[in-house]
Image (cartoon, rainbow, N blue to C red):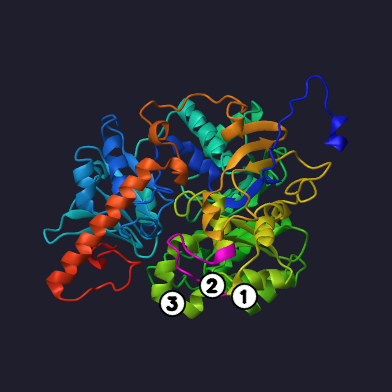
Amino acid sequence: NHELAGLVGPATRVVDALGRRLVPGLNDSHLHVIRGGLNYVLELRWDGVRSLRRALAMLREQAGRTPKGQWIRVVGGWTPEQFAERRMPTVAELNAAAPDTPVFVLHLYQSALMNRAAVIAAGFTRETPDPRGGQIVRGRDGEPTGVLLAAPGALVLYSTLAKAPRLDEADRRTSTIHFLRELNRFGLTSALDAAGGFQNFPDDYATVTDLARSGELTLRIAYYLFPQTPGQELDDLRRWTETVRPGDGDEWLRLAGAGENLTWAAADFENFAEPRPALDDGYEAEFEQAVRLLAENGWGFRLHATYDETIRRDLAVFEKLAAEGLFPAGNRWLFDHAETVRDDSLDRIAALGGALSVQNRMSFQGGVFLDRYGAEAASRTPPVRAMLDRGLTVAAGTDATRVSSYNPWVALHWLVTGRTVGGTPLYPPANLLDRRQALDLYTRGGARLTGEDEVKGVLREGCYADLAVLSQDYFTVPAETIPDIESVLTVVGGRIVHAAAEYAGLEEEAPPVAPAWSPVAHFGGYAARGDGAAQADTVAEAVAESGRHRAWRAARTGTDPLPGPAHPVDPCLSH
């Protein structure tokens, strides 16, 4: 206080942190923030909802206010493990909750559920062919049942979602503002946007660009460019290298490079419910052209690679180019995900000057990974400790919004406990991080990937004034309560962009949520545990109902199919 007193003048706003824990602003190193912002107000978020009973009640209520022609979309951020019932909803339950309003519920990279109205709205009939890598599940009569399966590719899921109505530009702007504020709520002040499918440049970047020009961004964004059309990737990359350059922009919105796909043929699928996909023979020729083009033009890049088998093939291309002096050559490049990367591959990445960005997809997909590959394989998926032990630059993120939740504290919980959202243990102590190390991956880690670690991710004079005052002390609370942490005061560039608890009302004003029927206008985003009574009642009811169902099953079959208290679920209802 004595040191700061001389900096306080007549116009200085002084905010007392009241002894709360203050941390550097968090930085999600792999977040689909631009795409997520364009759709946020249209989505009914089940993130953090603790019972399926409550989730279905939200859906039923939203159906009553959604206008004709619009869809209800539940798009990522949840898993059956978080529910007291420990199961998926059924198509019949979706039909009962919303008989006339189209409902689309995305489940990880694995599947989607649609009610009858959504099947009709999407134009699916008995004659509709299955798309490549996907399945439209049909009944005995040949009609679509409302279940879509990624087998193993998720194109069938995302292309169906793309059929839903879009917002107009004014509402896309408002939607993005509120999504950024929702991220600020958890102490996020920066993110690396990993682009993604159905995110075209420059059209789908126009909203954040407009907000940056008007000074309305409340999150610093470094973005990547992702070729969208198979067969056209090299043309897109060549055009971009001739018209824009990494570093274009400012500290609020800046181009970082290309990815997370460079060529479609080089990308594996991350659906652990299906066998590992074998990539096409010979994809390396086109992939090498793309990497060479970027390296020769001084472009960094990031690569989606779930499996070590993919990483090894990519590294062989890089090592070939390294013989020509293109690796390492000062261009930042990294692998995203890398769940099953092996130690010798990590050594090769280090030799080539690469980095890694890991996400907590195992928080949501750990159960299906265990079922397919077993506990030994899961114990180092991904091997974060081995990455750090080699001195590799490692950053943490979520891969939200279509799979994991955007809540960074769920990811931090995963890094320090090694447990899924439902509490299933995955990792031994040797693959866990302490809380300070995990926080470093979520602050300075992302800054290192963008070359901003001298000004971002640490609290010291000369750095950006990006910080968060926490609702609970991350360093002392019981580990199981880390996902419940939020920010009560988030500051970006000296501006208060989120304020709650004792600080409510200090934040910059935001426009009202629009359209008025938006699920976000009524339910908000992530369902905080502190919401209390409504969630507690529905959780208690759900547990009781699951217990009765389990007793009925035991009486009917003469056995308890699911011994132990932790799995009150009928496996017949799982997808």
Residue 276 vertical placement versus 254 (above, below)? below
Tag 2, which secondary structure?
loop
**28 and 296: which is toward the camera:** 28
Is tag 2's residue or tag 3's residue first in the polypeptide sequence? 3
- Residue under numbered circle 1: 430
Residue at 65 percent of width and 71 percent of height? 385
Q: Are marks 1 and 2 in contact (CB under 8 Å)?
A: yes
Place of residue 143 in the rendered image (x, y in percent of width and height, measured from the top left): 16, 54
Viewer can see residue 107: yes
Tag in front: 3 or 1:
1
- On the image, the x and y values in percent for residue 229 come to 48, 51
As drawn, the residue found furthest toward the front would be 19
Mark 2, other Cα within 10 Å: few <14 / some 14–19 / many ≥20: many
Give, as a single range, the part of the protein colored magenta. 416-428
The numbered dot on residue 164 is: none
On the question of residue 120 being in view, the answer is: no
Q: Position of 148 compared to 425: left or right?
A: left
Q: Amino acid at mark 3?
A: Tyr
Q: Residues within 10 Å of mark 3 (few under 14, many from 20)?
A: few
The alpha-carbon separation of the residues under discs 1 and 2 comes to 8 Å
Residue 419 highlighted magenta (yes or no): yes
Is disc 1 placed on a helix, strand or loop? helix
Which quadrant would the N terminus be assigned to in this image? top right
The residue wearing badge 3 is 373
Residue 427's disc number: 2
The residue at 62%/75% (across/down) is: 430
| Residue 507, percent from left and from top | 61, 28
